[in-house]
Amino acid sequence: MASGNQTMVTEFLFSVFLHLHGRGLFFFIPLLLIYGFIITLNLVIFIVIQLDIALHTPMYFFISVLSFLEIWYTTATIPKMLSSLVSEQKTISLAGCLMQMYFFHSIGITEGFVLTLMAIDRYIAICNPLHYPTIMTTNLCIQMTGGICLCGFLSILPEIVWIGTLPFCGSNEIQQIFCDFTPVLRLACTDTSLVVIVDAIHAAEILVPFLVIALSYIKIIMVILRIPSAEGRHKAFSTCAAHLAVFLLFFGSVAVMYLRFSATYSVFWDTVIAVTFVILAPFLNPIIYSLRNKDIKTAIEKLFCYQKGAVRVER
């Protein structure tokens, strides 16, 4: 569709994949294996927590929610990456791009809120253990989860609607491995000064959960250090270590990407940072929660042993 001498853009091209020069299959196979691993392990963790009554606690409830979200968080971007790596068509429609941005960021924001609830849960469990069962009830956990999902999926909607009203003309090359706000807004052929407001919203969505989590863990560490026995300190630290590792990995990479404001990186470093929180963090999260968590490992072993036993009985 033309307007004067300018052609209105109706689809975008992921230019990063053009620079692979036929080496797409080299990246396709490991990415496919990683994606399969992320989906499978997160699904196993989610199912195991639902089936094992011993894991029906607030901490594991939030882990199951995080695992469920991780499945859709990666599904919002990785399948399109896989397609772009091996197909001649490395484009995405404007509507598809907006949808990808919406689901990727809304799920990502919701994950940040879930990590915040997990930090608050650990804070109450360690700093106020006597009142923990009466505070962190099942109903409260469900209500808080519903609330953060609503906030996560609604908070990003105005930005997506605004971007959908912008005209795009001239170049249609997105210098990123998925549709993201800054690369897409660079292609708009109109005033995008409102991007400052968008940056401020992103900063708030990142900094508020970050500060709540950081303050919770500072208080937790102060309480743990006052525990007299070394065994008690080790047990308390071990319950928080996995959460802290996921928190640092998730918020560290997201902060580098979205709290830059006027700072710019090269396309290479933009891609590296994006790979960290789009692929690497979701890949490591279920490993941290399953391989470092004795209760989940035991529950997974029980589930597979039960399945094997059921198969033998049928035979």
Image (spheres, rainbow, N blue to C red):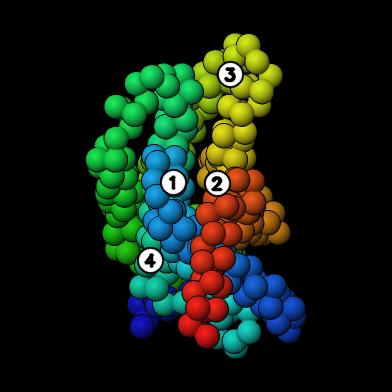
Say which residue label 4 marks: 98
Coordinates of residue 120 in the picture (x, y in percent): 42, 30
Instruction: Please state which of the two labelled residues, at mark 4 or mark 2, is closer to the viewer.
Output: 2
Q: CA distance from mark 3 to mark 1?
A: 25 Å
Q: CA distance from mark 4 to mark 2?
A: 40 Å
The three-letter amino acid code for the residue at tag 1 is Ala
Q: CA distance from mark 2 to mark 3?
A: 21 Å
- Circle 3 — which element? helix
Q: Quadrant of residue 246?
A: top right
- Circle 2 — which element? helix
N-terminal of the pair, mark 4 or mark 1, is 1
Coordinates of residue 297 in the picture (x, y in percent): 59, 53
Say which residue label 1 marks: 54
User: What label does residue 295 carry, if any?
Assistant: 2
Label 2 environment density (alpha carbons within 10 Å; few <14, some 14–19, many ≥20): some
x 62%, y 48%: residue: 288
x 63%, y 84%: residue: 86
N-terminal of the pair, mark 2 or mark 1, is 1
Above-or-below relation of 29 to 194: below
Label 1 environment density (alpha carbons within 10 Å; few <14, some 14–19, many ≥20): few
Instruction: Please state which of the two labelled residues, at mark 4 or mark 3, is closer to the viewer.
Output: 3
Q: Nearer the viewer, residue 12 or 140?
A: 140
Q: CA distance from mark 4 to mark 3?
A: 45 Å
Q: Are marks 2 and 1 in contact (CB under 8 Å)?
A: yes
The three-letter amino acid code for the residue at tag 2 is Asp
Coordinates of residue 78 in the picture (x, y in percent): 54, 69
Say which residue label 3 marks: 224
x 32%, y 45%: residue: 145
Numbered circles on residues, count: 4
- Circle 1 — which element? helix
Q: Are marks 4 and 3 in contact (CB under 8 Å)?
A: no
